[in-house]
């Protein structure tokens, strides 16, 4: 894969449903593991993901897909224009949330809490640009509008970028793995002492 693509799972779902590419080719292009792609194909993932066409987005051409369908060893490559756009989108410093998106913050927070419970409240505050009190009230289901909140992906709502979301998820997973390793090390140490 040349660069990180936006919305990798949605792109993978579209490629699974509309092409004859192998799981390895899709996984390589989307920056995922082949087993993740297989789970998406089997629809074993916890939430349903709507496919996003990389052809309509200009990331790939139909010819690129056809070439890779014919040769399972060939790999898909992002076109240069898309790669430049993605790099530029990571450099955007603006943290302003338009008025139209502000009402969607609780929906985004609930989606993050449900789908990525390892993400800390501080990370959610940074992603969604909200307060800890709001995140805690949604996590504890005491928010004043809780009955009206529906979980929705913050990337699709335009609140944060796919890159920022992926970075927060990766950071949370690293912290969980580190704490698990530390706990296992302590348990092993205690076992030795006994």
Image (spheres, rainbow, N blue to C red):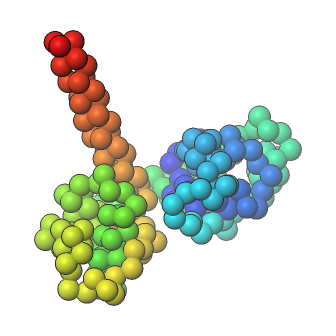
| Nearest the eye: 69 or 181 | 181
Q: Residue at x 62, y 41 (%)?
A: 34
Q: Position of residue 99 (x, y in %)?
A: 29, 85
| Quadrant holding the N terminus | top right
Question: Which quarter of the figure has residue 129?
Answer: bottom left
Which x, y percent locates residue 184? 27, 27
Please tell me how many numbered marks the rendered image carries.
0
Q: Residue at x 59, y 56 (%)?
A: 44
Q: Where is residue 68 drawn, in percent x and y?
A: 78, 45
Residue 150: percent from left, percent from top: 39, 79
Residue at 43% x, 59% y is: 162
Looking at the image, can residue 13 be seen?
Answer: yes
In the image: residue 138, left or right of residue 71: left
The correct choice, above or below, for 145 with respect to 179 in the image is below
- Quarter of the rendering containing residue 148: bottom left
Q: Nearer the viewer, residue 56 or 134?
A: 134
């Amino acid at each position: 894969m040349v660069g990180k693509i936006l919305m990798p799972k949605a792109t993978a779902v579209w490629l699974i449903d509309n092409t004859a590419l192998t799981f390895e080719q899709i996984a390589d292009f989307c920056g995922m593991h082949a087993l993740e792609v297989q789970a998406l194909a089997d629809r074993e993932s916890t939430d349903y993901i709507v496919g996003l066409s990389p052809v309509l987005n200009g990331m790939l051409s139909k010819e690129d897909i056809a070439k890779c369908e014919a040769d399972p060893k060939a790999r898909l490559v992002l076109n240069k224009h898309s790669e430049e756009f993605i790099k530029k989108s990571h450099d955007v410093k603006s943290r302003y949330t338009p008025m139209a998106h502000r009402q969607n913050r609780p929906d985004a927070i609930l989606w993050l809490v449900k789908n990525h419970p390892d993400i800390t409240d501080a990370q959610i505050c940074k992603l969604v640009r909200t307060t800890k009190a709001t995140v805690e009230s949604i996590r504890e289901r005491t928010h004043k509008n809780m009955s009206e909140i529906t979980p929705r992906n913050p990337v699709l709502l335009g609140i944060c970028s796919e890159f920022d979301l992926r970075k927060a998820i990766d950071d949370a997973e690293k912290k969980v793995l580190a704490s698990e390793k530390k706990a296992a090390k302590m348990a092993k140490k205690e076992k030795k002492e006994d």
